[in-house]
Amino acid sequence: MKEPSFTVGIEEEYLLVDKASRDLVTKMPASMLEECAARCEGQQVSPELLRSQIEVGTRVCANMTEAGESLRLLRRTVIDVAESHGLAPIAASTHPFAHWAEQKPTARARYSSLYQEMQTAARRLLICGMHVHVGIDDDELRIDLMNQFSYFLPHLLALSCSSPFWEGQDTGLKSYRLTVFDAVPRTGLPERFDSYPEYERHVRVMIEAGLIPDATMIWWDLRPSARYPTLETRIMDVCTRVDDALCLAAIAVCTLRMLYRLRGKNQRWRIYSTLLLNENRWRAMRYSVDEGLIDLGKGHIMPFPQLMEELLELIHQDAEALGCVKEVEHVHDILAHGTSAHRQIKAHQEALAAGASTAEALSIVVDHLIMETARGM
C-alpha cells in the first residue's frame, strides 16, 4: 500500500464579541467575511450556524510549518478585520456568559433544515470546535486507522479544553462543549467498521431512509471526511493559543503515522470497547489533564503527563519524519501552564478575589480570551 500523504488541514471556529460590552454580537457585519476572504485567498473564511460565529480553514498543507503559517494568517486577518468593526474574535469553545436563546441563526438552507429537525437541541449549539484533517488517500486504510485512532481521542480532548463556563456559570467541567453537542444525533465516538464498503452501506441506509442528505451530517468525534480524502478529528475544543492548536494537530498526524507504521510491521493498536473509551472521554471533559486517564492496557488510571510521555516516545520518529518535533514537544508547555480552561478559571477566581462582581469577573475572562487568541500572531 502506498504511504499516505499525511497532509494537514486545520479548521477553527471563533466567537465574535463586542469589545465594549464583551457580549457576543447578534449579527456579523455584512462586509466582514468578504474582507477576510479577500486577504486570505485560497483559504476558507465562512459563516457558521450562528451569526456570532466565524469559521476559518487552512489550505491543504504539506507539513506543520505550512499549517502554522496558514493558521496564523487566518487568525491575524480575522483579528484585524474584526478590530475595524469594534469587534474581536475569541478562540474558545463557549463564551463565559452569553445566552444561547439570544443568538440569531445564519440564513442558510442547511442550517434552517437543522433547526427544523432538531429544534432546541440545535438552537443550543453556541459552541465552537477545532477540526484536523489528515490526508489518507486509501479508503480502507482510512477506516482501519479510524478504528485504532479512537483510543487517543480523549487525550487530544484533555489537552484542548476551553469551555469551562456556560451562561455565566462555572460548570465544574473543563470542556462543557461536548455536553451540548452530545444532545445532537450522530455525535460522540465513531462507530467501528470492518471495511469501507460496510461504512458506506450504513450511510446509504440513512440517506435512502431520508434521515440525512449525505455523510456530512454525521458528526462523530472522528470521521472519514465526506468531502476530502482525509480522516477528520473533531473531538477537540478550539484552542485559545495558536501554538496549542498546532501542537494538537501535530500530535494527531504523528499518531496516525505511527499507527500506519505499525501496520507495515503487521502490528496494530488494540481495539477497546466503546464503554471504556467513553469513560476516558468523560474524564477528559471533566478534568482535562488534572486527574489522569485509564491506561486501558494496564487497567488503571495513570497520571496524564505520564501517558503523554509514553505517547511522545511512540511518535518521536514520526515527528522527526514529518518535521514537527517542535510542535509535538509543545505539549510540555500545555502541561506546565494548563489549558485555556485552566487559565480562564484562574482569571475568574483572581478577579472575584480582588473584589470584582460576578459580571465584572466574567468580562475579565472575555478580555483574557481576546488577548490569548491574539497571542503569537
Image: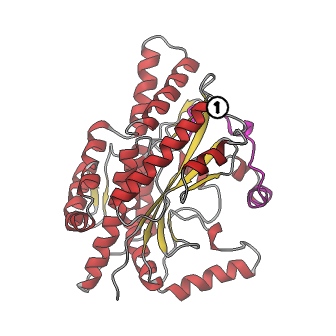
- Three-letter residue code for mark 1: His
Q: Is residue 62 left or right of residue 14?
A: left
Which range is magenta? 92-117
Q: Which is more toward the observer, 273 or 217?
A: 217
Left or right: residue 161 compared with residue 185: left
Query: Where 173 falls versus 44 (above or below)?
Result: above
| Residue 341 drawn above or below residue 232 | above
Q: Is residue 344 visible?
A: yes
Place of residue 178 in the rendered image (x, y in percent of width and height, measured from the top left)? 54, 51
Q: Is residue 67 above or below residue 202?
A: above
Q: Position of residue 56 (x, y in %)?
A: 55, 52
Q: Nearer the viewer, residue 180 or 127?
A: 127
From the top left corner, tell me how far across and down residue 360 is, in percent: 55, 18
Q: Can you say which quadrant of the picture contains the C terminus?
A: top left
Look at the image and say whether residue 112 sits in the magenta stretch.
Answer: yes
Question: Which secondary structure lies at badge 1?
Answer: loop
352 relative to 114 in the view: left or right: left
Mark 1, residue position: 85
